[in-house]
Image (spheres, coloured by chain):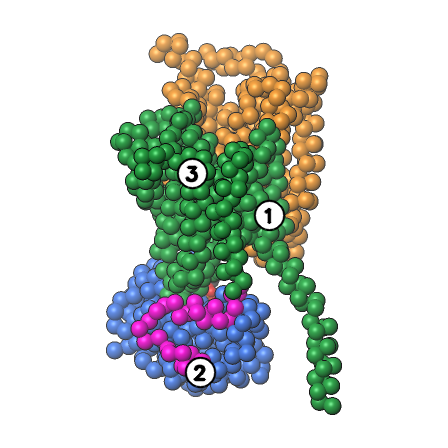
Amino acid sequence: MTDATLLVLASTLSTGLILGAIFALVAAGVTIVYGCVWLPNASNGQFFLLAALAAWSLAGAGWSSAAAIIGVLFMGIALSLVIEWVLVRRLYDVPERNVAYFVVTLGLTQIMSGIFAMSWGLWSDQFTLPPLVDGITMIGPFPMTNNRIVVLAIALGVLAVLFAALRYHPYGRALRAVFQNREAAALRGVNVRAIYRLSFLLGSSIIFLGGMLFALAYSFDLTVAWTMSVTAFAIMIVGGPGSVLGALVVGMVFGFTQAIVSIFASPTAATFSYLLAMLAMLLFRPSGLFNR
Amino acid sequence: MSLLQVDGISRHFGGVTALRNVDVRMREGETLGMIGPNGSGKTTFVNIVTGHLVPDGGRLLFKGTSIAGAAPHHLAALGLTRTYQAVRVFGGLSVRKNIEAALLLGLSGAPAAAEQDELVHWLRLDHRLSSPAGSLTLFEQRRLELLMRLLQRPSLIMLDEPVGGLAVTEVREMIALLQELKARCSIFVIEHTMRVIRELADRVVVLMAGEKIADGPPADILRDKRVVEQYLGTAHA
Amino acid sequence: MNGRHLAIALAVAALAAPFVLEGNRFLAFVFGIVMINLLWASGMNLLYGFVGLMPLMFAGIAGIAAYAMVALTREAGWSFWLATPVAAVGAAFVGVLLGLPSLRLKGFYFTLCSLVIQSVLTLAFTFFPRFTNGDTGLNQIEPPAWGGVQLAGVWFDATLSVVAVVGVLLAAWIVQTRLGQRFIAIREDDVLAEVMGIDVVRNRIIAFFIVSLYAAVGGCFYASYVGFISPRSFDVLTSLGIWLCVAFGGRGTIIGPIIGTVILAPIPYLLQELQAFKDVLSGVLIIVVTLVMPAGIHGEIMRRRSLRRAAAPPTVSAAEAVSSNGGAR
Ligand SMILES: Nc1ncnc2c1ncn2[C@@H]1O[C@H](COP(=O)(O)OP(=O)(O)OP(=O)(O)O)[C@@H](O)[C@H]1O
Ligand SMILES: [Mg+2]
């Protein structure tokens, strides 16, 4: 193998890892909320983009990237609380709430993309966050920016914590109990509405974080919202709605797919393939790969 | 020839075995009761026979022909119908519209207007025709359910706990209605209320954890030691 | 009958409007667009309002027909009046084929599936430019000719009025046939409908075919009326916009989509300078309709009216009681 191919291989590998971890993160955020509250958030891509843009603005105002990320996370939690209070909680007891919520979030998507077009869209068409850390590390013969290594570490770390928390933390256990059977959990004394709120907050915070990690690693434009929405939904459906493990595995697979496809064709081709994968899954195995 | 012949059907849900190797036969004109503790597989049995669920294995014959894999709408046309444990009517539509929906089946032998009126009257729904079905009392909704089935002239109707949730006086009335119903079609009835079984059934099948543990006349079954211990003794102490 | 009079009045208004608006080309054009949207909305209503499925690939099917119509007229030299029915039936078959597997799904899964299909179609329009010319779109689409003369101005508007009126009347007729009654039963409870002997999947397919025809015919007229189409003319926002006309006006009624379309369809043209604001507005409306008034404007009016009626009886019955007492005495 020549050096050039090696380099392409290495960059594909690192891109695949980072994209995969971010995809898995966002999809986990979507799938937790769907699995637990039965609410599919179609505007997850807009949430993702909002966080990235907000961090970009704060960085532009002179904040360091780390400070911007923490600031946006707090703002994101506040915003989620407001959305939960104004919109989401009205749907907790609606029987067909998944359709209603899907439609509501489609509306939210339109509102947010309208707002983005009227604001950030006028200011710039490419955005990026300044790196968290500078420098380059050689991993074997392959160079990788320290910034991307940190992004990857954060993404994988959050995923690991999430996974462990869902399994071992009492809140995580209650969350999973509600996943499995709302009535039974309620009978055992779990406060179902509180768990709903918690999982909505958790899910959106993860999506916000995913958006900012993406902005650290890559430059982006406003169309990333749509792409991310499609990707996250495809991962959720293929991995099995409600399955965090499914989100992890399929997210990684999609990340590598995207990295490889981008070498030969436009990234849209990757989006196209996610759409087809989701379609096939919906039609032939709606419960997904990782659900019993 | 049996009206209904069920041979060795089983059904699993993940790790749960809801039914294991159950045989049931029913003659034309017979009223067959089914009892068993909660979760013993009674509703699953009806779901399988009426095409709502696919069994893991076994044979299903109705009037001598195999009905394995047949869709519910197909079975309705053949004369096999059911009601639901949680009452099910078109709640958003008026009683009259519910009746019209039942007549959509378009059988050649559909009841004429006079007979329809007679059925409506018999089930005492005449004064409710323009009310939304969802606003009816539970007892009225159960009668509407029966009416909608009878308009389709079934040969076999499978009732899943027809007196569940009814008041004592209503139970008595419902039993009287079902007595009269026997003249119109064969009845399969799931019940926890022993009175219903004792007064209606010619024969009783007992399910325990998905298996058939007894089958015979109600008088014998309700005295059977095993049944009394395992079911009547525990569930209805 | 009240309903019949209203129907005649509305039909006459629709047919007369092009002649009234003749002096103002812009308003006449917006009116023509409203008529096309009315056709679309009454088709969407058949599926969303009467069968209970939300087909977000509606615009995609309209797009297939529109592109096919343009190809048939331009490349094969067919007349619009031959190309439109052929393209419409073809697109409806494609629609059913695409929708067929998803018709087993319901609720959220159906809606998601239709959204995915819509996205695939939009991408296909963009990336297979042989017939669509990609993102650039097709322009200078000829208007239909009628006896050698091209339809233009007021006569084209009037043609659209006729098409819309026929579409609405057809929908009104369908919903009171046995087929329509089956649709309603399926919407109310598909499991119970199945037990009552209704072949749910088959009836959904029939509904889907009819609805695809509405989408497709509207798509062909849209292309020739506006003269320009691109993938954006038939994207998910178009589907959502048509859906909103139905939901906002009042689904499951014939008058509801008319109300919704007349109010909402002109907005994008009246707010031409403010596209982004239009998105925000329609997003807000989608949320309001879903959360606050699921029965739409028409449902809201009916609710208010029945509340008033419910509030009225005490006085009425009191009056009756007095008079009957008087009679007894
Ligand atoms: N769709 C399903 N998915 C998973 N498990 C099911 C399903 N339907 C039934 N079961 C399980 O199968 C078993 C039998 O259930 P079934 O509803 O047939 O009981 P039943 O005898 O009708 O009880 P009851 O008297 O409470 O109505 C139960 O353990 C139940 O949890
Ligand atoms: Mg049961």
Labels 3 and 2 in the same subunit = no
Q: Colour of chain B?
A: blue
Chain identifier, green in the render: C
- Out of C278 and A241, give the one closest to the viewer: C278
- Out of B154 and C249, give the one closest to the viewer: C249
Looking at numbered disc 2 in the image, what kind of residue is underneath it? Glu
For the point 35% across and 71% down, the residue is B80
Q: In this view, does A270 lie above or below B103?
A: above
Q: What residue is disc 3 on?
A: C156
What percent of the width, then of the height, locates residue B201?
Answer: 42, 82
Few, some or many residues within 10 Å of mark 2 (<14, 14–19, 20+): few
Q: In this view, does A45 lie above or below C302?
A: above
Element class at badge 1: helix
Distance between the Cα atoms at labels 3 and 2? 57 Å
Q: What residue is disc 1 on?
A: C289
> Disc 2 is attached to a residue of which chain?
B
Looking at numbered disc 1 in the image, what kind of residue is underneath it? Val
What segment carries the magenta color? B91-118
Looking at numbered disc 3 in the image, what kind of residue is underneath it? Phe
Element class at badge 3: helix
Q: Which residue lies furthest to the bottom in this view?
A: C329
What percent of the width, then of the height, locates residue B98?
Answer: 47, 69
> Disc 3 is attached to a residue of which chain?
C
Q: Which residue lies furthest to the top in this view?
A: A3
Chain identifier, orange in the render: A
User: Does the stretch in magenta take in B94?
Assistant: yes
Few, some or many residues within 10 Å of mark 3 (<14, 14–19, 20+): many
Q: What residue is disc 2 on?
A: B118
Q: In this view, does B173 lie above or below C292?
A: below
> Disc 1 is attached to a residue of which chain?
C
